[in-house]
Amino acid sequence: MSEEKDLILTEEEDLEATVPTVVLTLDDDSEIECDILEIFKVEEQEYIALLPRTEDPDNTDVYLFRFHEDEEGEPVIENIETDREYEEVTDAFNAIMEKDYEGLEDEDFEEEEFEK
């Protein structure tokens, strides 16, 4: 049986962009705020990739869940049940990230000059 997680959508404004976030309520009733990295499909199922917000700048843990909307249009996430499904979803997410960031190291970025 799939276990549903409580999900609260929020938005946090950054200097230049709005970052969509969710607050997950875990099994022990603790809460963790996460950035939404991507919502993507593998076959006919949608998935969501979440990056927990932590004080540790080296934290690169990404949470992957099944994703859908209920009858009222509210977002619902569920645990991925099998190792095989998790591997397929991980491979798809990694491919998306590689494509999104392909060539970034090679691009020339110009520094903006600010008047004092």
Image (cartoon, rainbow, N blue to C red):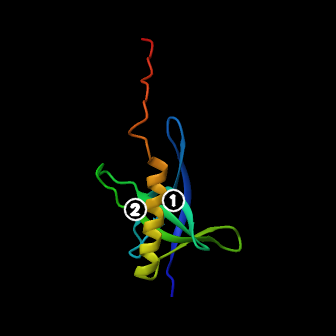
39 relative to 116 in the view: left or right: right
Residue 60 higher or lower than 104, as above or below: below
Q: Secondary structure at mark 1?
A: strand
Q: Residue furthest bottom?
A: 1
Query: Cβ–Cβ below 8 Å for labels 2 and 1?
Result: no
Foreground disc of the pair 2, 1: 2
Tell me, for residue 62, which label it has, or none. 2
Where residue 73 sits, quadrant-wise, is bottom right
Residue 34 in percent (x, y) is at 45, 58
Residue 64 in percent (x, y) is at 45, 68
Tell me, for residue 22, which label it has, or none. 1
Residue at 45% x, 55% y is 97
Q: Residue furthest right?
A: 72
Residue at 43% x, 41% y is 104
Q: Secondary structure at mark 2?
A: loop
Residue 3 in percent (x, y) is at 49, 81
Q: CA distance from mark 2 to mark 1?
A: 13 Å
Which one is earlier in the sequence, the residue at label 2 or at label 1? 1
Q: Amino acid at mark 1?
A: Val
Specify few, some or many for label 2: CA neighbours under 10 Å numbering under 14, 14-19, or 20 or more. some
Q: Nearer the viewer, residue 90 or 50?
A: 90
Q: Amino acid at mark 2?
A: Val
Q: Nearer the viewer, residue 7 or 88?
A: 88
Residue at 54% x, 40% y is 17
Residue 113 higher or lower than 99, as above or below: above
Residue 51 higher or lower than 3, as above or below: above
71 relative to 103 in the view: left or right: right
Q: Nearer the viewer, residue 20 or 32?
A: 20
Where residue 9 sits, quadrant-wise, is bottom right
Tell me, for residue 94, which label it has, or none. none
Residue at 43% x, 25% y is 110
Specify few, some or many for label 1: CA neighbours under 10 Å numbering under 14, 14-19, or 20 or more. many
